């Protein structure tokens, strides 16, 4: 990338392969100190998986309320750690709303990252470790969903400044996917930008797919105080960033983490960084939690035979499932799964899936929308269970 000092804070090395082990360790300890036997969490994956693991160690039961749109590897971890699961709504916003109106959870410890401020206290330790290894970093790039991680780091850096451990604060760059970028849109609103429709679109960065970020205003305040900025990244640049990180650094990151790599490249192309500035990208979680990414990377090699055909069909089925009640066009599936290849192959797969009763079609004008059937959902659920056994 032509940068002299580029660092990656690799949180995939934690026990359940994400930065959320910091929060889970603290929250479960706190729950035990108050004699709770059960913990509840509404999240889009990483915190729920971590809490399930740590609760298991302490002999506590864990209830995870998760959205339908979630990385299958995170869901598999929850199942493996013996967590009870309830699927509510499309995104984590729906799961949180459901949790807030429940009346029978007084005997549960609240483990949801957006609803328990101890999450910030745990995650701010990332800032401590960055300073311990990289003295006086100039830029910190952070993926944003609800904005809570960015606020955590800003709190950590402020405490280090007040303790005279550091002499200045780094500039923060909050990064989102263009498929869902409510914090970025709000940040630039006063500069005359047009706010996009915040309807959730298809995205591979499911870890930061949030419709109404609870920490939005506070995250923007922190970014402005740091004299930093925000960016939204094109979906097609995410997979390329994952590939670069794997090939050149040996780090297999989840799509949400790869947003920071794409942002660095974009800022470097705009000559934002000075030659001697130290830049830190936060890698929040492992790509193993999103198995379809592994398949997408491996498909760059010449794969033939029935295995690749089945993989393609499962990818198509997954994309149709993600579209929910809106449905999805065949051309959009082609754009996501196999750009640059003949679209006829996608339509052949769609025909096969329809003949097996896994998907259905609906005509909209001159176009055809595809929807998943109950049998199709069962196939994907069976895949989830299979992954937990591997």
Image (tube, rainbow, N blue to C red):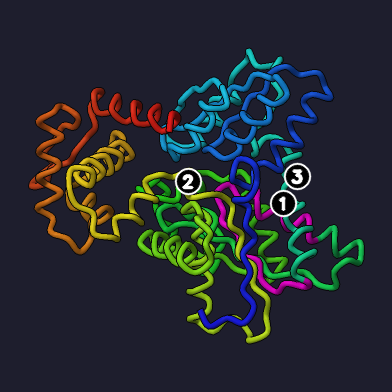
Element marked by disc 2: helix
Please check the rendered image and state whether residue 142 is part of the magenta-colored stretch, yes or no.
Answer: yes
| 1 and 3 marks in contact (CB < 8 Å) | yes
Q: Nearer the viewer, mark 2 or mark 3?
A: 2
Element marked by disc 3: helix
Q: Which residue is mark 3?
A: 122
Between discs 2 and 3, the one toward the N terminus: 3
Q: Which residue is mark 2?
A: 288
x, y percent for residue 342? 12, 59
Position of 266 compared to 368: left or right?
Answer: right
Instruction: Give the quadrant of residue 339.
Output: bottom left
Q: Residue at x 40, y 27 (%)?
A: 385
x, y percent for residue 274? 63, 85
Position of 33 compared to 378: left or right?
Answer: right
Instruction: Give the quadrant of residue 244.
Output: bottom left
Instruction: Give the quadrant of residue 348.
Output: top left
Position of 237 compared to 309: left or right?
Answer: right
Position of 371 compared to 5: left or right?
Answer: left
Q: Which residue is mark 1?
A: 152
Marks 2 and 3, Cα distance to the nearest angstrom? 24 Å
Marks 1 and 3, Cα distance to the nearest angstrom? 8 Å
Find the magenta span and give its range: 135-157
Between discs 1 and 2, the one toward the N terminus: 1
Q: Nearer the viewer, mark 1 or mark 3?
A: 3
């Amino acid at each position: 990338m032509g940068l002299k000092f580029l660092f990656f804070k690799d949180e995939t090395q934690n026990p359940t392969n994400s930065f959320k082990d910091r929060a889970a360790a603290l929250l479960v300890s706190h729950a035990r100190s108050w004699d709770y036997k059960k913990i509840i969490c509404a999240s889009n994956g990483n915190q729920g998986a971590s809490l399930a693991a740590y609760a298991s160690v302490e002999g506590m039961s864990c209830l995870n309320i998760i959205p339908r749109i979630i990385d299958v590897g995170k869901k598999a971890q929850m199942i493996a750690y013996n967590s009870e699961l309830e699927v509510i709504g499309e995104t984590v916003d729906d799961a949180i709303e459901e949790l807030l109106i429940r009346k029978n959870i007084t005997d549960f410890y609240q483990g949801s990252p957006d609803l328990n401020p101890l999450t910030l206290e745990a995650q701010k330790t990332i800032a401590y470790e960055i300073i311990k290894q990289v003295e006086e970093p100039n830029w910190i790039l952070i993926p944003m969903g609800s904005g809570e991680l960015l606020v955590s780091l800003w709190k950590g850096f402020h405490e280090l400044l007040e303790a005279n451990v550091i002499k200045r604060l780094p500039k923060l760059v909050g990064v989102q996917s263009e498929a869902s970028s409510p914090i970025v849109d709000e940040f630039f609103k006063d500069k005359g930008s047009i706010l996009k429709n915040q309807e959730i679109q298809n995205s591979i960065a499911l870890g930061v797919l949030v419709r109404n970020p609870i920490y939005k205003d506070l995250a923007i305040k922190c970014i402005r105080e740091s004299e930093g900025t925000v960016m939204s990244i094109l979906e097609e640049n995410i997979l390329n960033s994952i590939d670069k990180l794997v090939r050149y650094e040996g780090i297999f990151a989840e799509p949400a983490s790869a947003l920071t790599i794409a942002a660095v490249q974009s800022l470097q192309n705009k000559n934002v960084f000075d030659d001697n500035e130290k830049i830190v990208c936060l890698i929040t979680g492992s790509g193993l939690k999103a198995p379809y990414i592994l398949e997408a990377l491996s498909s760059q090699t010449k794969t033939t035979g029935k295995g690749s055909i089945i993989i393609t069909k499962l990818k198509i089925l997954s994309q149709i499932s993600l579209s929910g009640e809106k449905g999805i066009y065949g051309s959009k599936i082609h754009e996501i799964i196999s750009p640059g290849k003949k679209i006829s192959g996608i339509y052949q797969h769609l025909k096969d899936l329809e003949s097996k009763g896994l998907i259905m079609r609906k005509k909209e004008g001159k176009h055809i929308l595809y929807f998943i059937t109950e049998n199709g959902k069962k196939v994907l659920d069976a895949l989830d269970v299979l992954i937990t056994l591997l």
